């Protein structure tokens, strides 16, 4: 085994949600190939190292992108997600910056469409194998990338949110007490769990004044969110994220309704903390707003990093349109001895389902 693996990567971003992309096929054809055979056991540590903003590349998450025109990549996707992956063009795995796995990332999927164009010259609607089933992505141009997501899951059991008598019911305007406060929450699952908040004594008018002026992403401290996430709600967001009623933890959204077709949104991402943008959070906020009868089904969602257009379609699927950009390309060396299998869940985040944790790679 070589002392170091050299990993080529693309750094990409969707509305400031910055992500590191590794090309599975390039790893397969390099001396780093052994990584793929133990991917699910080493990716947590690899992600934490590569996403470190002071010692490595830095990012909100790590994506292993796989083009399924390669037989070995296709078999790896089948091992991860099942036989339906055989009919897909692409597959991926996504991990938050703390190493925890997330089953969905809307900004990441838009960036995946651009990755497919840049790395494989693939265009047109493309089917992606994900833990949440097949998802369709389509790159029109870098400012207009669409993703069609599957129907949201809305019952307490599906989110999951654990409270007596709510397993089979929608969690809409559910009274929620934490940190000495009580306020209503609406919860949805769009491939990952979300807790959406429209009301609360902490949602003061000046909380959203940051949206009144442009927020250059270069001024944001992504580690603490000091520039683009209100510090007065950071402790609350963290407490909700880790609350035991959310057994897989949860993303948290704080929403201001401007009108029935436009909202502003602060996001606290499970496993990453405050981020400039989160595509699944934008979808969750719109769905929650419809369920609470605050919003129409087509809404512009403005986040600190920019605006996404979300539409909850008549067939119950969800359409997202927004930008995706390449920041830079590069390569990084990482010591092979450092990539040891995780023996503990360091992040207290979502656990990999048995099917995935037992899946072989290649």
Image: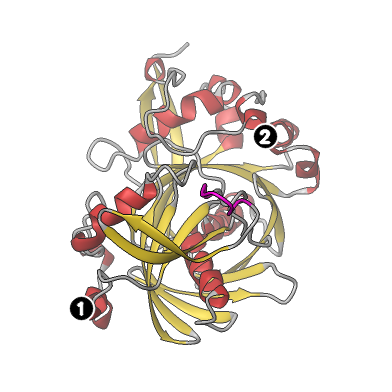
Q: Residue 342, image x and y in percent? A: 44, 21
The answer, for residue 261, to whether it is visible in the render is yes
**Alpha carbons under labels 2 and 1: distance apart:** 45 Å
Read off the residue under disc 1.
Answer: 206
Circle 2: element type: helix
Residue that protrudes farthest toward the front in the picture: 165
- Prevailing secondary structure of the magenta residues: loop
Q: Is residue 335 shown above or below 119? A: above
Q: Residue 221, image x and y in percent? A: 21, 55
Residue density around tag 2, few if under 14, some if 14–19, many if 20 or more, within 10 Å: many
Q: Is residue 142 shown above or below 344? A: below
Residue depicted at 20% across the width and 78% down the height = 206
Magenta-tinted stretch? 161-167
Is residue 130 found inside the magenta-colored segment of the image?
Answer: no
Image quadrant assignment for residue 49: top left
| Foreground residue among 42 and 238 | 238
Image quadrant assignment for residue 252: bottom left
Q: Is residue 192 left or right of residue 238?
A: right
Which badge, 2 or 1, is on the more N-terminal residue?
2
Q: Is residue 50 shown above or below 146? A: above
| Foreground residue among 296 and 94 | 296
The answer, for residue 144, to whether it is visible in the render is no
| Foreground residue among 237 and 272 | 237
Q: Is residue 316 left or right of residue 194?
A: right
Read off the residue under disc 2.
Answer: 80
Q: Residue 7, image x and y in percent? A: 45, 32
Q: Is residue 32 shown above or below 227? A: above
């Amino acid at each position: 085994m070589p002392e170091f693996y050299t990993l080529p990567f693309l750094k990409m971003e969707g509305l400031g949600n910055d992500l590191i992309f590794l090309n599975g096929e390039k790893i397969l054809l390099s001396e780093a190939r052994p990584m793929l055979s133990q991917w699910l056991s080493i990716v947590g540590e690899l992600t934490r190292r590569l996403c470190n903003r002071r010692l490595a590349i830095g990012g909100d998450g790590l994506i292993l992108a796989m083009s399924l025109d390669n037989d070995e990549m296709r078999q790896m996707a089948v091992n991860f997600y099942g036989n339906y992956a055989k009919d897909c063009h692409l597959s991926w795995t996504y991990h938050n910056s703390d190493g925890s796995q997330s089953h969905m990332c809307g900004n990441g999927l838009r960036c995946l469409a651009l990755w497919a164009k840049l790395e494989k010259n693939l265009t047109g609607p493309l089917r992606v194998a994900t833990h949440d089933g097949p998802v369709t992505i389509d790159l029109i141009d870098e400012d207009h990338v669409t993703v069609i997501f599957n129907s949201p899951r809305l019952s307490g059991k599906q989110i999951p949110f654990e409270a007596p008598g709510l397993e089979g019911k929608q969690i809409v305007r559910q009274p929620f007490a934490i940190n000495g406060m009580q306020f209503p929450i609406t919860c949805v699952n769009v491939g990952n769990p979300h807790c959406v908040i429209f009301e609360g004594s902490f949602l003061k008018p000046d909380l959203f004044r940051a949206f009144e002026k442009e927020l250059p992403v270069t001024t944001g401290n992504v580690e603490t969110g000091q520039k683009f996430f209100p510090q007065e709600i950071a402790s609350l967001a963290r407490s909700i994220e880790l609350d035991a009623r959310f057994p897989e933890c949860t993303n948290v959204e704080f929403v201001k309704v401007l009108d029935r077709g436009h909202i502003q949104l602060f996001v606290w991402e499970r496993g990453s903390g405050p981020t400039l943008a989160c595509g699944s959070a934008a979808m969750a906020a719109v769905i929650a707003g419809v369920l609470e009868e605050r919003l129409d089904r087509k809404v512009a969602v403005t986040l600190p990093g920019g605006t996404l257009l979300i539409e909850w379609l008549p067939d119950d699927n969800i359409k997202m349109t927004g930008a995706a950009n390449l920041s830079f390309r590069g390569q990084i060396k990482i010591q092979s001895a450092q990539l040891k299998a995780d023996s503990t869940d360091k992040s207290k985040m979502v656990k990999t389902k048995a099917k995935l944790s037992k899946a072989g790679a290649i």
